[in-house]
Image (cartoon, rainbow, N blue to C red):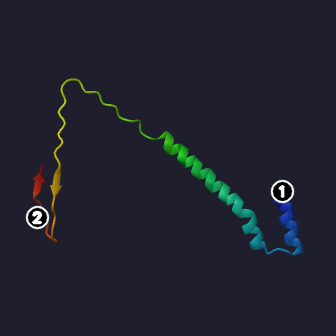
Amino acid sequence: MASLPIGGALWIVGQVDPLTLGITLGSPAVAALAVARLVAKIKDANQAAPQPVVQHYHGAVHQDTRTVTSNTRSVIANNRIIER
């Protein structure tokens, strides 16, 4: 609000182009609004983040550690899966 009388006085006197004045006075406000919106989006994303899944197993557990590789060649693929 304090910049409006100064900007109006400069425009009336004709010392500053109105477009230049608008860009100069408007760009900090636009940047501040963009930063505020970004912070709000980050806060919303952090609050909506899923909680970690904790799984408890009772009894014997077997873990399969085999690696499966695939070789794909040409336009028409002929996949042969090789287990190691």
Q: Residue lying furthest top in this view?
A: 58
Q: Secondary structure at mark 1?
A: loop
Q: Amino acid at mark 2?
A: Asn
Whether residue 60 sits left or right of residue 19 in the image: it is left
Label 1: how many Cα within 10 Å (few below 14, some 14–19, many 20+)? few
> Sequence order check: which comes first, mark 2 or mark 1?
1
Against 14, is 30 above or below?
Answer: above
Label 2: how many Cα within 10 Å (few below 14, some 14–19, many 20+)? few
Mark 1 sits on what residue?
Answer: 2
Whether residue 56 sits left or right of residue 83 in the image: it is right
Q: Amino acid at mark 1?
A: Ala
- Picture residue at 75% right of the left edge, 72% below the top: 20
Numbered badge on residue 35: none
Q: Secondary structure at mark 2?
A: loop
Q: Residue lying furthest front in this view?
A: 84
Of 47 and 68, the residue lying toward us? 68
Of 20 and 77, the residue lying toward us? 77
**Residue 1 locus on image (x, y percent):** 81, 55
- Picture residue at 14% right of the left edge, 66% below the top: 77
What is the quadrant of residue 80 in the picture?
A: bottom left
How far apart are labels 2 and 1 at the CA level?
73 Å
- Picture residue at 30% right of the left edge, 30% below the top: 55
Mark 2 sits on what residue?
Answer: 78
